Each structure stands twice: as structure tokens, then as C-alpha cells.
């Protein structure tokens, strides 16, 4: 060893930086959903603190949340299979204000509806609401056995399926083109659209489990 050198002071090169927990740099924001729901703040969201050029509000704007309807409405535990998508449009202080972004249903709900010996009928349509939002709606329906039916199956003919799809699309376009986005989501949640389609299409073939399966905001 070289004379005069202290062996205890040898420092290794490229010493590791102290790793901080990622959540130390984050702040929590309240997520406010539109006023048609009972629970106005169903969730919180983390976001990195504003630092230098990076603004926290910019990274929050446009963020999409998928929340179960059971968490948003008090008496909606039976409808917890409905998932509502909301997107952040405005940030004020520690509050994020959102608007509708879409709707979906859970995979297990869809699996419980599909049965053998029945015909599945699907239709989708794209249209504009009164307040100028372009939306795409997907509808799903299943044929129903009639009372006192002996035959095991209840399949609809190709021509009947075609007529049902046309009727579905017609009803969806009519409802969307005369409603605002807010009113339309009220109808989706109350299942009134599904009931109307069931009533109108039953003249062609009896239907059951008619749902607006998915809604996309374009």
C-alpha cells in the first residue's frame, strides 16, 4: 500500500443513487363524475407534482376512468356489471371534473347471457347527439322461448334477424338524435332503450336480455 493513503476512504466508482418510493413525488386528486350519479366523487387519482416545465394538470387532462355503476349509484348493486367510462376535461385545484367517455359491460355478465338453443342478434349504429357528440352504440339481444313451447330451440330465421337489426338501429338513431349526451346516458342506465327495443321487435320475434352492450364516444 502506498504510504500516507488511508485505506478506509476508498469510495467505489458509480455508487448507487438512493431509490425513493415513486409515490413520494405524487399528489392525490378527487375525480368528480357528472351530476346524474348519486356519488359525485367515487374515486381518487394520483399524479406527479408540478415540477419545472411539467404541469400536473396537463398530465391529468384526458385521463380516462372506468368505474362500475355500483360504485356511482347507491341502489345499483344489481347493475354493478355496467362499467361507465369518464374522461377528465377540467382540473381546478385538487379536483378533476369529468365528462362521459363511454360505457361497457363486464365479461362475466355477457357470458351469463349467452345460452345454447337461442339466437344472438347484434347491431351497431353511429350517430350524433343534439349537443354535437358523435357516438357509436352496440346493441345485443337474444331470442326467447314462447309460452307452452314444446320445441327445444328458438332460432330466428335470417330474414327475421335482418328485420330485428334494422328495427334496433332505427330505435337507437331516433333516441340518440333527439337527446343530449347526458339524457342518453340516463336512458342507458335506466335500461329504457332495451325495453323499447324488446317491445318493438317482439312483433317480429320474441326477445329477451336486450341490452345496449357498449357505447363509444368518437
Image (cartoon, helix red, strand yellow):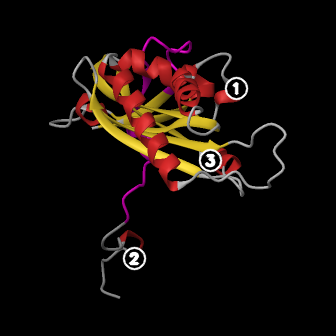
Residue 190 lies in quadrant: top right
Answer whether residue 171 is visible to the viewer in this image: yes
Q: Is residue 36 magenta?
A: yes
**Closer-to-camera residue (3/180):** 180
Disc with the residue nearer the chain's start (2 vs 3): 2
**Proximity of marks 2 and 1: CB atoms separated by less than 8 Å:** no
Residue at the (34%, 29%) spot, across then down? 173
Residue at the (58%, 36%) spot, across then down? 210
Task: Tell me the tag on residue 77.
Answer: 1
Instruction: Decide: few, some or many residues near mark 1? Use Cα within 10 Å; few <14, some 14-19, many ≥20.
Output: some
Q: Which residue is mark 2?
A: 7
Instruction: Please give the range of residues in magenta.
Output: 16-43
Identify the secondary structure beneath mark 2: helix
Disc with the residue nearer the chain's start (2 vs 1): 2
Instruction: Decide: few, some or many residues near mark 2? Use Cα within 10 Å; few <14, some 14-19, many ≥20.
Output: few
Q: Which residue is mark 3?
A: 110
Answer whether residue 98 is visible to the viewer in this image: no
Amino acid at each position: 500500500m502506498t504510504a500516507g493513503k488511508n485505506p478506509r476512504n476508498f469510495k467505489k466508482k458509480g455508487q448507487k443513487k438512493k431509490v425513493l418510493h415513486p409515490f413520494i413525488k405524487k399528489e392525490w386528486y378527487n375525480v368528480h363524475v357528472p351530476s346524474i350519479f348519486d356519488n359525485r366523487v367515487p374515486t381518487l387519482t394520483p399524479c406527479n407534482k408540478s415540477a419545472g416545465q411539467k404541469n400536473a394538470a396537463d398530465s391529468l387532462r384526458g385521463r380516462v376512468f372506468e368505474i362500475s355503476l355500483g360504485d356511482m349509484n347507491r341502489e345499483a348493486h344489481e347493475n354493478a356489471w355496467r362499467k361507465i367510462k369518464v374522461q377528465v376535461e377540467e382540473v381546478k385545484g385538487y379536483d378533476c371534473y369529468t365528462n362521459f367517455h363511454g360505457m361497457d359491460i363486464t365479461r362475466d355478465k355477457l357470458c351469463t347471457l349467452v345460452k345454447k338453443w337461442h339466437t344472438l342478434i347484434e347491431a351497431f349504429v353511429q350517430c350524433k347527439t343534439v349537443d354535437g357528440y358523435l357516438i357509436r352504440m352496440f346493441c345485443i339481444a337474444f331470442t326467447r322461448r314462447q309460452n307452452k313451447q314444446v320445441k327445444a330451440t328458438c332460432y330466428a330465421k335470417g330474414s327475421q334477424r335482418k328485420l330485428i337489426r334494422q328495427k334496433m338501429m332505427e330505435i337507437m338513431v331516433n333516441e340518440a338524435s333527439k337527446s343530449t349526451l347526458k339524457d342518453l346516458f340516463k336512458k342507458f342506465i335506466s335500461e329504457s332503450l332495451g325495453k323499447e327495443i324488446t317491445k318493438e321487435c317482439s312483433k317480429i320475434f320474441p326477445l329477451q336480455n336486450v341490452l345496449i352492450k357498449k357505447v363509444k364516444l368518437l
